[in-house]
Image: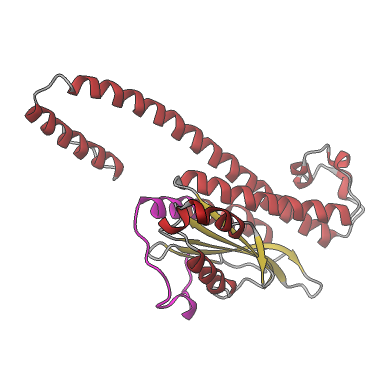
Amino acid sequence: MSVEIGKTLGTDAMPIEGLFAERFMELVQSWFAPLYKRVSEPLWDNGIYGVIRRAYYTCRFDVGVAEYYVPTVLNGEGFIQCHRIAVVVLPELDRETYEGEIVRLIRPLSSPLGFIDSTTIFVVAPKVTRQHAFKVWKEKFKAMLKIKRVAGCFVIPIVSPSPEIAFKKLMSHVKNFWERRVKAFLERLKIQPWMYDYRVKNLISNTFKVLENYDKQIIYCLKSMVAHLVYFVDGFKEALRAIGSLNLMKGKVMDTARRLAEALAVLEPEKREKLLIRLQECLLAAHVGLKPKL
């Protein structure tokens, strides 16, 4: 489900092109879009609570921008609070564009879910601009690309030529953020790791008795946060598996390319050119999911 984006995403939005942006947005959306149905809805739209009636997210593939709201806890007045995650994908990154995107994404792109208690902004690109790639700029740019806090928002830049690696980094940051929040929650309740057998996932189980003596609403919020954390941990593991599969495929492709180069070397130039054109057509067909005509 996607909601309308306000004027924040008007003429200033930057259109994106290329396989990196398309693949990265696909990975992000495929993991965050089902979050509501798999985790949030069973917890917060049931016979006990009805505070989240739908998924709250925005995803624009055409401009490479996405925004997701993840429920955290109920406040003292019974309103839900949330963690806002904003993502923008750029063709390349330089200082001016980076600072501009931060300013643009500080404001919510759509109507928020309840009260925003935390925001993480990801600015993602496959490369830096040519100017910033030169040695004289590298040290300054490295300093600029450190995680920082702007207007109460955590800003995290990610630069990687691989969309799978960029997604893995994003999931790692989200996972770590939620791990810190859950840990702080447990510390406030004076719940020690040994009490849940050093596996935070155990806290979701109804058979686990360590939480029996605490306020029911507080424990419900804790279990909700743990359930969302587990989902993000699974996303990080899935990203690692995707990278492993990609590396395995890359090794096979490199081996095939070597043998193909050896075979092509003995062909006449004209036949070699025709075969290369045909191979290119097959690879393109495979990329878009079509069965190549042999």
Splitting the image into 4 quarters, where does residue 55 fall? bottom right
Which residue does the image show at 53% across and 53% down from the upper left?
Answer: 138
Splitting the image into 4 quarters, where does residue 71 fall? bottom right
Splitting the image into 4 quarters, where does residue 140 fall? bottom right
Q: Quadrant of the C terminus?
A: top left
Height in image: 111 above or below 259? below
Q: Is residue 127 left or right of residue 174?
A: left
* Closer-to-camera residue (2/294): 294
Height in image: 81 above or below 261? below
Q: Is residue 79 highlighted in magenta? A: no
The magenta stretch spans which residues?
1-28
- Report whether residue 47 is seen: no
Q: Is residue 286 left or right of residue 136?
A: left
Residue 128 image point, x, y percent: 46, 55
Residue at the front extreme of this rendering: 136
Which residue does the image show at 88% across and 41% down from the upper left?
Answer: 195
Q: Is residue 186 left or right of residue 135?
A: right
Q: Is residue 229 left or right of residue 18?
A: right
- Report whether residue 81 is seen: yes
Residue 51 image point, x, y percent: 67, 69
* Closer-to-camera residue (273/8): 273
Q: Is residue 27 highlighted in magenta? A: yes
Residue 127 image point, x, y percent: 44, 52
Height in image: 260 above or below 242? above
* Closer-to-camera residue (165/245): 165
Residue at the bottom extreme of this rendering: 7
